[in-house]
Image (cartoon, grey):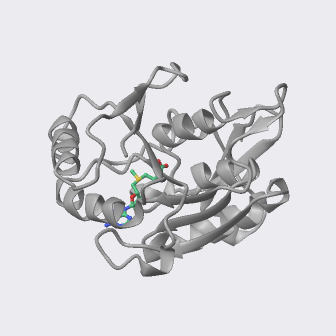
Amino acid sequence: MSHDITSANKMAALSDGKEEARYFVRVIEKNDGSCLHMKQCSEGDVGCVVWDAAIVLAKYLETKAFWDPDAGTNLWSGKTVLELGAGTGVVGLMAATLGANVTVTDLEELQHLLHVNIRDNQCLVRHGSIVPKVLKWGEDVTEFLPHPDFILMADCIYYEQSVEPLVKTLRDLAGPDTSVICSYEQRTTGHNAEVEKKFFQVRSKCPLCPGEVSCITNHYPQMACRTFIVW
Ligand SMILES: C[S@@+](CC[C@H](N)C(=O)[O-])C[C@H]1O[C@@H](n2cnc3c(N)ncnc32)[C@H](O)[C@@H]1O
């Protein structure tokens, strides 16, 4: 899987300073009219751009299932959220701006980008909170306990070798009251379909894992991504 900086992402090159020149910004408008400004890197591994699945999941968090300003309901308020494979951090940032207390996690090499994006969007995080941390799938999760209310992951099911460690991390982190929401792009090329199948097979063998997976109906049809509640 490679990222295409020039096409789908509506980006504008930054011109203020040499450090900034290697970033490109993607603007994501929230329902309240404010905007998240997500820096992406022009060079780097898969985590350094905003993938469509992240937009779709971020927009799902704003749907009336969770947040309805007219009715005065906000399910995110005060909830603990952990994002796996956060990349740029857009999903976690959306949750934090909605009032959740969020930990965004990824590999060591993504930490700088996560820090930069949190700093740049901190002004939108008024009632919630957000911190970046290193979490490599399959490794010890003690530091991330007690079990969060929600685990979020966008486009993390794409690499066969990481399926078992990813499911181990979900099993270790998910408590009886944790919801795991995942979104991913439906790709027709490569091994994606097999990797998805393997993920759901490995997941279904976990003790205490609910048998059913609920697919969220298409709340953001502009992008070919599916959103599931997988735990
Ligand atoms: C396709 S990117 C998705 C990034 C972001 N969630 C998005 O949708 O824009 C997959 C992410 O998973 C992270 N990742 C891959 N393998 C990992 C592992 N073993 N442990 C933790 N994170 C991992 C990558 O660093 C990357 O940020």
- The front one of 65 and 166 is 65
Q: Is residue 28 left or right of residue 158?
A: right
Write down the quadrant of residue 45 in the picture. Answer: bottom left
**Residue under the image location 32 percent in, 77 percent down:** 139
Determine the residue positioned at 41% across, 59% down.
Answer: 174
Tally of numbered discs: 0
In the image, residue 108 above or below residue 154 = below
- Foreground: 157 or 145? 145
> Residue at left 22%, top 56%?
207
> Residue drawn at (54%, 22%), measured in percent from left and top?
219
Which quadrant of the view contains residue 133?
Answer: bottom right
Q: In the drawing, does residue 110 fall left or right of residue 74?
A: left
**Relative image position of residue 60 (x, y in whole percent):** 58, 33
Quarter of image, ligand 1: bottom left
Residue 53 x %, y %: 46, 38
Relative to 19, say whether 5 is above or below: above
Residue 6 position, x and y percent, is 51, 39
From the top left corner, tell me how far across and down residue 197 is, in percent: 17, 39
Residue 175 horizontal side relative to residue 128, left or right? left
Q: Is 125 in front, or is 79? A: 79
